[in-house]
Amino acid sequence: MVNLGLTRVDDALAAKHPGLESYAACQSQAFMKGTGSFVLGVVGFFAIQKALQRKLPYPLQWNLLISIVAASVGSYAVTRWETQKCSDLWLLLETGKVQDRSSPQANTPEESKGPGKTKYGDVME
């Protein structure tokens, strides 16, 4: 039986998707990395600001606010990165294909192959 959060997944569904347990473990680990990066980020940013406060004094509430906001942004980035890796793992386990994320998939316009006509009958160059 596979646990997803607090709920248990039916054995029939788990048998249909054999990679579900690995995916659930990966997601759990991703969320724990995000939580850990938030805690370490708050402590780190707070310590850095305390050291800098001798040169640039400002109230403790701003120290906390800046630390929490900066750590939240960092934690979001870590969690998103790790969750994307879990999604890639899921696709690999389900389809057997690895998704290529190295190059952006931008649509490149086709080059014209000579003069053509517009829908109004004009010749394009």
Image (tube, rainbow, N blue to C red):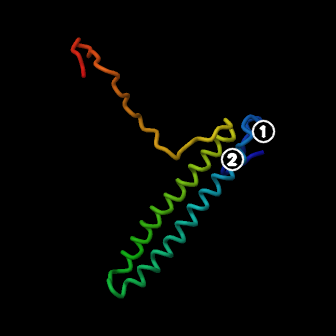
- Left or right placement of residue 89 versus residue 61 in this view: right
- Residue 92 lies in quadrant: top right
Q: How many marks?
A: 2
Residue that carries the numbered disc 2 in the rendered image: 7
Please state which of the two labelled residues, at mark 2 or mark 1, is closer to the viewer: 1
Q: Residue at x 24, y 22 (%)?
A: 125
| Three-letter code, disc 1 | Asp
Picture residue at 71% right of the left edge, 48% below the top: 22
Rendered image quadrant of residue 65? bottom left
Q: Say whether residue 26 is left or right of residue 111.
A: right
Could you say where residue 95 lies in the image, as x and y percent from the top left?
A: 67, 35
Q: Residues within 10 Å of mark 1 (few under 14, many from 20)?
A: few
Q: Which residue in the rendered view is the most extreme toward the top?
A: 121
- SS for dot 1: helix
**Viewer-nearest residue: 98 or 60:** 98
Q: Amino acid at mark 2?
A: Thr
- Against 82, residue 97 (above or below) is above
| Whole-percent x, y for residue 55 in the image | 33, 86
Above or below, comparing residue 18 to residue 26 in the picture: above
Q: Tell me the quadrant of the picture where the N terminus can be found.
A: top right
Give the image location of residue 115, x and y in percent. 28, 19
Question: In the image, residue 62 lies at what x, y percent?
Answer: 36, 75
Q: Secondary structure at mark 2?
A: strand
Residue at x-position 65% and y-position 38%: 97
Q: Which residue is mark 1?
A: 11
**34 on left or right of 94:** left
Q: Along the horizontal axis of the image, is 84 left or right of 49?
A: right
Gap in Å between the C-alphas at discs 2 and 1? 13 Å
36 over 5 or under it: above or below: below
